[in-house]
Image: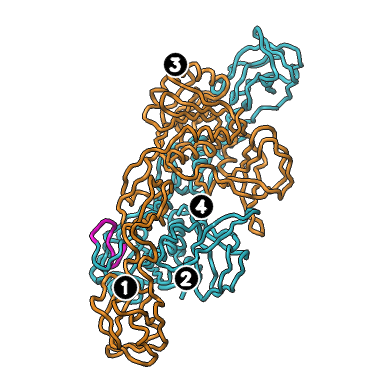
Chain colours: A cyan, B orange
Amino acid sequence: MLAVEEARARILAALSPLPAETIALAQAQGRVLAGPVAARLTQPPADVSAMDGYALRAADAAVGVPLTVIGAAPAGHPYPGRVEAGQAIRIFTGGFVPEGADAILLQEDATEADGQVTATEQPRAGRWIRKAGLDFSAGERLLQAGRPLTARDIGLLAAANHPWVSVTRAPRIGILATGDEIALPGEPLPPGGIVSSNAHALAALCLAAGAVPSVLPIAGDTEAAFQGMAQAARGFDLLVTTGGASVGAHDLVQSALAPEGFERGFWRIAMRPGKPLIWGRLGAVPLLGLPGNPVSALVCGVLFLLPALRRLQGRAETAPAFQPAIAGMDLPENDGREDYLRCALTRDATGRLVATPAARQDSSMLKTLAHAEGLLKRAPGAAALPAGSAVEVLDLIAMGV
Amino acid sequence: MLAVEEARARILAALSPLPAETIALAQAQGRVLAGPVAARLTQPPADVSAMDGYALRAADAAVGVPLTVIGAAPAGHPYPGRVEAGQAIRIFTGGFVPEGADAILLQEDATEADGQVTATEQPRAGRWIRKAGLDFSAGERLLQAGRPLTARDIGLLAAANHPWVSVTRAPRIGILATGDEIALPGEPLPPGGIVSSNAHALAALCLAAGAVPSVLPIAGDTEAAFQGMAQAARGFDLLVTTGGASVGAHDLVQSALAPEGFERGFWRIAMRPGKPLIWGRLGAVPLLGLPGNPVSALVCGVLFLLPALRRLQGRAETAPAFQPAIAGMDLPENDGREDYLRCALTRDATGRLVATPAARQDSSMLKTLAHAEGLLKRAPGAAALPAGSAVEVLDLIAMGV
């Protein structure tokens, strides 16, 4: 059986970033930049005042000596003339420092009366002046390709005068739940049936990651239903199936799909929960076959589907972001499969992250997964560890899943 | 000037959770539950097999003694009869354990030939059987009100047979940038003008937090423009303005809006960046007046707008989630304003989060904010700290902003 890291590497190696599309900056939150973006202007465009006060010549301004206020320079309304000796300009935060002036007298250090202003503190040349280009200069690269855009980035791109932005197209993900025994929530349930939860949970995972999911009609465990998959897969950037990965179903998938152009990359990985993972290609469309067990499907979704979506989006970082933590309880030795324990995440008195696995880790327990805050990773063959030992975790809340 | 904590408390105290709406479970990712949700069924609905193998009576099953395979119980297809002494049923993961059986013989511990199965390992009663209700039982409360729904929660609600879900209505946020000097990206820019970046950055902040923003046309710094705000505010759950909070503009806002029903809650807080914050009410609509400076507007957005959105959504947790970190460099003593330093976040060799402020923290530097990973909080009057000291940070990436 393949190691988790190797399985992920093979999935990522088989995928490429999607092409770019142009969207309005106002729609770009969470989208991934397709190329670097440079500033279209210089910010601030000229030397500007950092405070409300008076622009003047430092050499002139002595405490107690009145200067004539010859005009004003609010933000957006530059003073058109020049400040000469004995003169000052009323200025406000963001106002352009007028020609001739080299200092700002703060308004709290000044008294103004009868068109004259008098300093009560000596202003210093250059103080409270933001030089042109302090934030950025025209032509300067502001953001790199592969970056998911935050609200802060959108502010920066707006400030740099970009109404449009080039981002990778959002991945279109087909999601196909298979199984005779499942029915969607609220639908009539056959005797012995189970309500289908994987497809919509995985669709939500896709939405949270910036992809566009399509939930396909449930496919039964028949050769005909599997053959329909090849048709259903067309037009997607990735087809995600759940179920049909156990030994019996796998045989069926193999026999039904081989004539439809299915090429298996790998099947089964050394992981718990999630052993029966399939990776391959159905004609031109990459296929990720997740286990039918809901906990396994979602944990594999976090470990394989999310990185795949990041690759398709062209994100610079694709690997899950493991964080250091300490074990909140003793951990038994691990067998040959990489284990992901659903855990609570808390902080100890010194601020360290503490990961405490749920008492029972049966892979059928979806409620335990929903209430977990993290996944504690146990390497294959890891030795028993006492509480307080260093471990690695995925913070599911921070990952948005 | 008001302390940050007190300002946030006053904002939160003035807001209430919005009423509920019913949406499809498939649309519920990120939405906030309006009430608790209970399971509509028991999961698993009956005792089921945790593995592929044979269901039988443990008392019967001795190593080397063949049992007659009388039928099969795949998932979703319960065996209708009863297992008697000397008999076994082929069973698959998730298949109902048939009446009479009390043990699962794993398929890897069995040999099957000519309709008979023989154990190579002794099965134990109860082993590899998941009891009915192991995950959850009908009527059991699964999720509490105030919870933002993750992909995992959506899986759990689907499994519990909920096609619909009751969530708080998404907050409708009006966003109004004010100022004579600003123009939207790509629009003709007046001489001395600045490209407006706040409105769309704040809209992105709202989108990331699950609110529905409307960016209103820019309002100039005139009495008539401010009077139009009262009209524009109608129908929003919160009106967010940027700019118009400096001393001069504030006077204008006060004089223009008083006849329109503006009641000021507070103005100016002991914070950097972000002193000129306004909180009040314009008629029936709460009004949050953020500074015009883009860095101040976004930092105040993180510290005040996000908690306000969480309150409107009915989220259980509203306060920003500060995390412990250590200072990556010496920090000077702080003055009387609570300071938020844009910082990089890294991890040291022992896994501790290290917050290193950008060298220059001028509040006009938006690029520095976009490239920051966190905000390092400095309390009012905090003493100088050497590198390595304990500090508190907000992880902007983990917060999704």
Label number found at residue B158: none
* Mark 4 or mark 2, earlier in chain: 2
Query: To which chain does the residue with label 4 belong?
Result: A
Count of number-bearing discs: 4
**Identity, as a three-letter code, of the amino acid under mark 3:** Pro
Looking at the image, residue B370 sits to the left or right of residue B34; the answer is: right
Category of crowding for the residue at label 2, using alpha-carbon neighbours closer than 10 angstroms: few (below 14), some (14–19), many (at least 20) = many
Label 3 and label 2: CA atoms lie apart by 67 Å
Q: Residue furthest top?
A: A114
Q: Which residues are magenta?
A: A176-188
Tell me the residue at 44%/45% (across/down).
A166
The quarter of the picture where the N terminus of chain B appears is top right
Label number found at residue A271: 2
In the rendered structure, are the residues bearing label 3 and label 4 in contact, judged by CB atoms less than 8 Å apart? no
Residue under label 4: A398
Label number found at residue B259: 3
Query: To which chain does the residue with label 3 belong?
Result: B
Foreground disc of the pair 1, 3:
1
- Residue A160 makes an appearance in the image: no
Label 3 and label 4: CA atoms lie apart by 45 Å
Query: To which chain does the residue with label 1 belong?
Result: B
Foreground disc of the pair 2, 1:
1
Q: Position of residue A298 (x, y in %)?
A: 41, 61
Q: Secondary structure at mark 2?
A: strand
Query: To which chain does the residue with label 2 belong?
Result: A
Q: Position of residue A13 (x, y in %)?
A: 46, 64
Q: Secondary structure at mark 1?
A: loop
Label 4 and label 1: CA atoms lie apart by 36 Å
